[in-house]
Image (cartoon, rainbow, N blue to C red):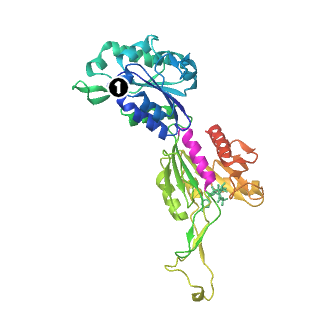
């Protein structure tokens, strides 16, 4: 959610300012670009140098700046505000809250806030009775009415020695609050999505297996984009070398089709959308040898196979509200074979890809697909990166929903 976001942190002068370097660090670790502005009194509590080092950006605190030659220029609060995808005022003292609520602009933080068109998150911090005071409550109500998100202060020991509500939310809680809030604005917010990806490996003996060329990339891109759209994502992956960058995705690694089926069934009931992008082996060896088979030991090296469960067809039988999207990897007669799979497996839609198209299917970072929907018919897409294909597929699913 925060990867690539421009986050502007405004720090006002309260003791909780000492926690803000950690907040900067959490945002940076999440892949965001962070800029910080301080009020003069905040710089008594936390060093601008620490914040500049951690944010990897200069930290302005006044309207003007002076370069090495003594030349004076202004800190452009308007461009700073326009740069931000969102602004976080943390800690927001009673003084800063009141000034924000009433349009006062006597420091750089306040003028930047007044110039900001982006979402604003406010984490108040002050002593117990100040937090309870009607005037603070009035400021917070007014700021909430402006459409800003208030991150509630937490309870605990306060700098005065008193104990109660007024502590700035812990940095981890501020990050979690913002992520949840941003997710709430997303089209898949509140939806649970399962994506299967990669091949399955069906063991013959401890060394050999029956598998296929799926790299998992198509499924991983679908999972990552679902998460960007706000979904809670479970990615059930066969053996691949891919890693999931998005830590909110729950990845479950499996080996065989039977293991994949078991993992899918554990999450299916509570899910809303299922996408079967995995290349599941249709058959597995009837017998798995305990030891490596020696060349000499088999006079007639035939491997007897039995059918694996058809995972998505099984879901087609037990589905209730869930949306089911399958894939069909074909080598010929794509539309005919895909249509049969769509109907026989009781799916809502199926993505067709064919090894006849160069750059499509597995073994490539690209794919060329057709989206065949029971409701909306067929839509064809040109060859694109699998990341771009995942976006096209999600756009089609959103239309279906
Ligand atoms: O992983 P990549 O290298 O990025 O490649 C992507 C891909 C080519 C693997 C992907 O785009 C794709 O087409 N996945 C489905 C491949 C496949 O197994 O197709 P199928 O036509 O055999 O299966 C049809 C559908 O039934 C699929 O949704 C499949 O997941 C599902 N199935 C199949 C067999 C089985 N036993 N259980 C299943 O659930």
Viewer-nearest residue: 71 or 285: 71
Q: Secondary structure at mark 1?
A: loop
- Which part of the image, by quadrant, shows the C terminus? top right
255 sits left or right of 175 in the view: right
- Residue at the image position 74 percent from the left and 59 percent from the top: 355
Q: Which residues are magenta?
A: 216-230
Residue at (48%, 51%) from the top-left corner? 267
Splitting the image into four quadrants, where does ligand 1 fall?
bottom right
Left or right of 349? Residue 132 is left
Q: Which residue corresponds to mark 1?
A: 45
Say whether residue 252 is magenta.
Answer: no
Judging depth in this view, the residue of 40 and 88 nearest the camera is 40
Q: Is residue 127 above or below residue 18?
A: above
* Spot occupied by residue 374 in the image (x, y as percentages of width and height): 68, 46
Q: In the figure, 385 relative to 295: above or below?
A: above
Q: State the residue lying farthest toward the left.
A: 161
In the rendered image, residue 226 lying in the magenta stretch gets the answer yes
Q: Position of residue 386 (x, y in %)?
A: 67, 49
Res 256 visible: yes
Residue 155: % across, % down: 28, 29
Residue 31 vs residue 305, the one in the foreground: 31
The x and y percentages for residue 48 are 43, 27
Question: Closest to the observer: 32 or 252?
Answer: 32
Q: Main secondary structure of the magenta part?
A: helix
Q: Is ligand 1 within 8 Å of the beta carbon of the residue shown at mark 1? A: no
Neighbours of disc 1 within 10 Å: few (<14), some (14-19), many (20+): some
Quarter of the figure with residue 12: top left
């Amino acid at each position: 959610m925060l990867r690539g976001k421009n986050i502007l942190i405004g720090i006002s002068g309260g003791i909780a300012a000492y926690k803000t370097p950690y907040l900067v660090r959490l945002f940076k670790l999440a892949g965001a670009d962070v800029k910080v502005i301080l009020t003069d009194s905040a710089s008594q509590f936390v060093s601008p140098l620490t914040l500049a080092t951690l944010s990897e950006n200069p930290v302005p605190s006044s309207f003007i700046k002076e370069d090495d030659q003594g030349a004076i220029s202004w800190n452009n609060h308007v461009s700073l505000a326009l740069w931000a995808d969102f602004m976080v005022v943390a800690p927001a003292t009673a003084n800063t809250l009141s000034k924000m609520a009433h349009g006062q602009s006597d420091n750089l933080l306040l003028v930047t806030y007044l110039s900001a068109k982006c979402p604003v998150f406010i984490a108040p911090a002050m002593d117990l009775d100040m937090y309870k005071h009607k005037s603070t409550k009035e400021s917070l109500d007014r700021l909430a009415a402006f459409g800003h998100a208030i991150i509630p202060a937490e309870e605990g020991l306060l700098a005065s020695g008193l104990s109660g509500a007024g502590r700035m939310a812990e940095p981890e809680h501020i990050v979690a609050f913002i992520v949840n809030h941003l997710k709430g604005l997303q089209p898949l917010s509140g939806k649970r999505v399962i994506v299967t990806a990669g091949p399955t490996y069906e063991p013959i003996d401890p060394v050999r297996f029956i598998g296929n060329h799926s790299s998992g990339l198509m499924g991983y891109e679908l999972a990552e984009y679902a998460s960007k759209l706000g979904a809670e994502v479970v990615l059930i992956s066969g053996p691949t070398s891919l890693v999931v960058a998005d830590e909110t995705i729950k990845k479950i690694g499996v080996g065989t089709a039977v293991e994949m089926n078991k993992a899918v069934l554990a999450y299916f009931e509570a899910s809303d959308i299922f996408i079967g992008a995995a290349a599941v082996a249709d058959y597995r060896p009837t017998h798995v040898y305990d030891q490596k088979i020696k060349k000499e030991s088999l006079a007639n090296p035939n491997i007897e196979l039995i059918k694996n469960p058809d995972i998505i067809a099984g879901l087609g039988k037990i589905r209730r509200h869930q949306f089911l999207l399958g894939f069909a990897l074909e080598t010929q007669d794509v539309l005919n074979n895909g249509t049969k799979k769509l109907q026989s497996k009781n799916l809502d839609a199926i993505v067709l890809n064919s090894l006849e198209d160069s750059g499509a299917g597995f073994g490539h970072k690209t794919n060329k697909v057709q989206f065949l929907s029971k409701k909306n018919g067929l839509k064809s897409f040109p060859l694109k990166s699998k990341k771009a294909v995942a976006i096209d597929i999600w756009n089609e699913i959103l239309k279906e929903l």
